[in-house]
Image (tube, grey):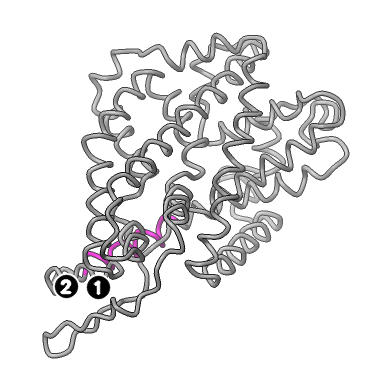
């Protein structure tokens, strides 16, 4: 998922006249930079955190069917339309909509409001990843059963990381110090990334996109060897067709792909505006980004549900109950599989994994 908002206005409107500054706009260093930055924008926490959770909640393969229909009928056309607009007008969102029709400038400002709303919880998720990342440097992972008195990874997440409490409970309104510090750290790093500008993003995008893919392949190879993995994968790819008759399944599928590709946020317009007017591969680039984004979600789902099947067998629960256990699913299942790497390699892979989560989130 991507949460980057609109860039500064590139058009001034004086006495109803629009003055463009597109000729002074910097350009991409290469086609690869543009594709990688857009892929980093699209591929985020939602691909390995929210997508598997939604699949588990809405009938496994049934949700995937609704997801793919929503992709081709709603999200992909909107995403392509935004990149075409940015390339045509060579301006950011505000400038683009102002040039199209001056009263439409307000449409671009909506994306800024949406960004502020989404960031209130998206940054919090990254804060959780920061805590796991720091704790992974221990000689033995602190959520390993031997280290936490036999607790499950789900218990560790809820009780130790979040220190979760209901609003009515004593201490339910207390500020959690480590969560607050983690959140401030995320905001600071976000500021540093934005301060570097487009050129910095383009140069580091190769690493921030390719490294998560490599690590997911490693985790997948480990996950599919676990006992019960087949049951989890079977649930993932077998559709419960009854869910396709429910409106909330289609609503969830549409929200997931819109959350991931994030059209209407203004970023696709801004990024495509940095191309030369003569650039003629916008549609091909869109196809690469759209396919890679959904492909990463689906591939990550195989890794997640392999671990879900293992957890279901270990805990004596049905796969669907573990799969729909909540928004902390990814922190539960991946934390579990990280304790299973042989020898003393678990902390190393844990550091890499939660560093990957941070990259995915900050890239977006």
> Measuring 73% from the left and 38% from the top, which residue is drawn there?
350
Q: Which residue is mark 1?
A: 95
The quadrant holding residue 248 is top left
| Label 2 residue SS | helix
Q: Is residue 345 above or below residue 234?
A: below
> Measuring 64% from the left and 35% from the top, which residue is drawn there?
215
Q: Residues within 10 Å of mark 1 (few under 14, many from 20)?
A: many
Q: Position of residue 42 (x, y in %)?
A: 42, 47
Q: Which residue occupies the foreground of this view, 167 or 341?
A: 341
> Measuring 59% from the left and 69% from the top, which residue is drawn there?
192
Q: Which residue occupies the foreground of this view, 72 or 112?
A: 72
The quadrant holding residue 176 is bottom right
Q: Position of residue 299 (x, y in %)?
A: 49, 27
Q: Is residue 82 above or below residue 245?
A: below
Q: Is residue 62 above or below residue 41?
A: above
What are the residue bounds of the magenta stretch?
Answer: 106-118
Q: Is residue 322 left or right of residue 313?
A: left
| Label 1 residue SS | helix
Q: Is residue 109 magenta?
A: yes
Q: Is residue 128 above or below residue 349?
A: below
> Measuring 20% from the left and 68% from the top, which residue is drawn there?
97
Q: Position of residue 45 (x, y in %)?
A: 51, 43
Q: Is residue 16 magenta?
A: no
Q: Which residue is mark 2?
A: 99
In contact (CB < 8 Å): disc 2 and disc 1 = yes
């Amino acid at each position: 998922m991507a949460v980057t908002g609109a860039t500064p206005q590139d058009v001034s409107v004086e006495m109803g006249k629009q003055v463009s500054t597109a000729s002074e706009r910097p350009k991409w260093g290469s086609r690869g930079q543009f594709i990688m930055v857009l892929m980093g924008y699209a591929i985020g926490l939602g691909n390995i955190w929210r997508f598997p959770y939604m699949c588990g909640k809405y009938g496994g393969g049934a949700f995937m069917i609704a997801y793919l229909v929503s992709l081709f009928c709603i999200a992909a056309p909107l995403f392509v339309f935004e990149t075409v607009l940015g390339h045509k007008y060579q301006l950011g969102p505000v400038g683009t909509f102002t040039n199209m029709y001056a009263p439409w400038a307000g449409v671009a400002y909506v994306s800024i409001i949406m960004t502020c709303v989404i960031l209130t919880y998206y940054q919090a998720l990254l804060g959780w990843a920061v805590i796991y990342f720091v704790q992974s440097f221990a000689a033995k992972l602190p959520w390993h059963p031997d280290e936490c008195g036999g607790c499950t990874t789900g218990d560790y997440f809820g009780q130790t990381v979040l220190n979760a409490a209901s609003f009515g409970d004593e201490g339910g309104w207390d500020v959690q110090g480590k969560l607050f510090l983690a959140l401030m750290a995320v905001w600071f790093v976000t500021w540093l990334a934005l301060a570097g500008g487009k050129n910095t993003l383009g140069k580091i995008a190769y690493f921030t996109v390719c490294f998560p893919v490599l690590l997911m392949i490693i985790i997948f190879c480990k996950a599919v060897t676990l006992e019960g993995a087949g049951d989890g994968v079977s649930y993932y790819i077998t559709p419960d067709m009854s869910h396709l008759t429910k409106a909330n399944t289609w609503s969830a599928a549409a929200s997931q792909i819109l959350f991931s590709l994030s059209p209407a946020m203004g970023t696709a317009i801004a990024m495509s505006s940095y191309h030369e007017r003569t650039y003629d591969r916008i549609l091909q680039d869109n196809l690469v980004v759209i396919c890679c984004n959904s492909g990463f979600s689906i591939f990550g789902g195989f890794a997640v549900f392999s671990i879900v099947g293992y957890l279901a067998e270990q805990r004596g629960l049905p796969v669907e109950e573990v799969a729909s256990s909540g928004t902390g699913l990814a922190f539960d299942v991946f934390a579990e599989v990280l304790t299973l790497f042989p020898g003393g390699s678990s902390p190393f892979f844990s550091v890499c994994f939660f560093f990957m989560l941070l990259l995915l989130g900050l890239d977006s």
